[in-house]
Amino acid sequence: MDRMKVVVADITTLAVDAIVNAANSRLVAGGGVDGAIHRAAGPELQAECRTLGGCPPGEAKITGGYRLPAGRVIHTVGPVWMGGVEGEAEALASCYRRSLELARAHELREVAFPAISTGVFGFPPDDAARIAVGTVKEVLAGDPHFSKVIFCCFSESSAELHRAAIEAAHD
């Protein structure tokens, strides 16, 4: 899929239509990717998030990008890993699907995702990469609207998992 790309970078530096924030359900600034996005975007992002009434796991909400190079931020709440028996895989797939549906509704063509739920939420990174790539591939197959979906990884090891998942998805 030539519309999927993997990069190792700080997601807050990407000049794309939208970046996805691995948020918490209250949509308040937290740690990891979420904290970095809020710090880079400035206090206006938190002010807008306060008006959204939170976000349940597997869903997504959109805000402005404020001081970020990305025009918009799509906030999605990934599942906390509970051993894989609490519907975590389905909830994670829903994060990617709902984020892309929201991007499509706002006519955003280039979207960058972090590795959702793989930090403090504890989702196994290899499984998360396969779910992310598989879900994005499925959405892209039915929607020519998107020009590029970027998997923005914080580490080379995460990027390798995403590259491997893309290769496997080609088979």
Image (cartoon, rainbow, N blue to C red):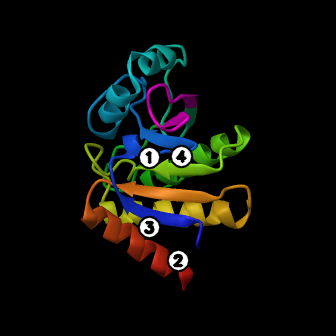
Secondary element at image label 3: helix
Instruction: Quadrant for the C terminus, please.
Output: bottom right
Q: Nearest the camera: 138 or 104? A: 104
Chain-order first, disc 2 or disc 4:
4
**Label 2, residues with CA under 10 Å away: few <14, some 14-19, many ≥20:** few
Across and down, in percent, residue 29 comes to 34, 25
Which image quarter is the N terminus in?
Answer: bottom right
Q: Is residue 79 visible?
A: no
Q: Is residue 58 above or below residue 164?
A: above
The part of the chain drawn in magenta is 62-75
* Mark 3 or mark 4, whichever is nearer to me: 4
Q: Which residue is mark 1?
A: 14
In terms of sequence position, does the residue under pointer 1 or pointer 3 come before the other?
A: 1
Determine which residue is flagged by label 4: 16
Mark pair 1, 3: CA separation: 23 Å
* Rendered location of residue 73, percent (x, y): 51, 34
Q: Nearer the viewer, mark 2 or mark 1?
A: 1
Q: CA distance from mark 1 to mark 4?
A: 6 Å
Per the image, the residue denoted by label 3 is 130
- Looking at the rendered structure, which numbered label has been put on residue 162? none
Q: Which residue is mark 2?
A: 169
Answer with mark 2 or mark 1, whichever residue precedes in sequence. Answer: 1
